[in-house]
Image: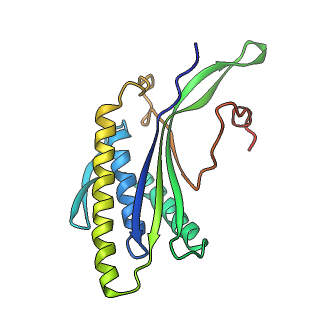
């Protein structure tokens, strides 16, 4: 039997330089709010006339802050009128696998990935600023609705929680992720 392919969800984000960091952080918090399976203190944050969920967790907030800063640097380094970059959130489960000589080892298997395709707008006139703000609000609202729709619809692939660890599913946030073939053997043996 062939293993099921992990779900990958793509979300398009449109923002200007002044708001790109806040918009990306808001979307990441919305994803984590629905996929962070530990006890959380929920928060709400207002951005562009929208109220979005967030999580009160210092470690997660620090990681999101670091990765959004790296994303902004990556966009700035493209030197294009409309900078583009990606940021991905991957959720893992620990699986035991047999190794040689009858020993066992844990491996992290990705069970879900969210990829944000971020496009940076650079308005030139005051009229452009208003148009971009409306487009950002629409993009953010559409992204939040898409996340809610997906998490309410797609639940069957979520692995069972089999640990009492504080966070049963490790995660990572990657800026400009490299696509990995499912037949690629390098990640399995720890080579990059």
Residue 66 visible to an observer of this rendering: yes
Q: Position of residue 188 (x, y in %)?
A: 70, 32
x 33%, y 60%: residue: 139
* Residue at the extreme bottom: 125
The percent position of residue 58, horizontal first and vertical second, equals 40, 55
Q: Residue 55 at x, y = what percent?
A: 32, 51
Classify residue 111 as left or right of residue 137: right
Residue under the image location 74 percent in, 44 percent down? 192
Q: In this rendering, is residue 11 above or below 111?
A: below
**Where residue 63 sits: x, y (%)?**
48, 56
Q: Quadrant of residue 159?
A: top left
Towards the viewer: 75 or 169: 75
- Who's the residue at 69% across and 37% down the image? 187
Q: Nearer the viewer, residue 91 or 134?
A: 134
Name of the residue lying farthest toward the right = 101
125 vs 152, nearest the viewer = 125
């Amino acid at each position: 039997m062939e293993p099921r392919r992990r779900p990958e969800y793509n979300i398009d984000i449109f923002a200007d330089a002044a708001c790109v960091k806040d918009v990306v952080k808001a979307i990441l918090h919305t994803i984590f709010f629905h996929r962070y399976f530990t006890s959380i203190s929920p928060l709400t944050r207002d951005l562009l006339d929208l109220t979005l969920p967030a999580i009160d967790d210092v470690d997660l907030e620090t990681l999101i802050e670091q990765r959004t800063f790296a994303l902004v640097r990556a966009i700035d380094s493209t030197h294009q009128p409309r900078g583009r970059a990606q940021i991905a959130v991957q959720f893992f489960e620990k699986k035991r696998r047999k190794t040689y000589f009858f020993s066992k080892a844990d491996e992290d298997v990705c069970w879900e990935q969210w990829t944000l395709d971020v496009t940076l707008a650079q308005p030139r006139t005051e009229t452009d600023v208003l148009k971009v703000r409306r487009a950002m609000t629409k993009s953010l609202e559409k992204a939040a609705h898409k996340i809610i729709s997906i998490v309410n619809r797609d639940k069957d692939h979520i692995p069972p929680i089999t640990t009492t660890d504080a966070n049963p599913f490790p995660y990572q946030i990657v800026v400009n992720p490299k696509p990995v073939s499912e037949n690629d053997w390098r990640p399995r043996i720890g080579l990059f």
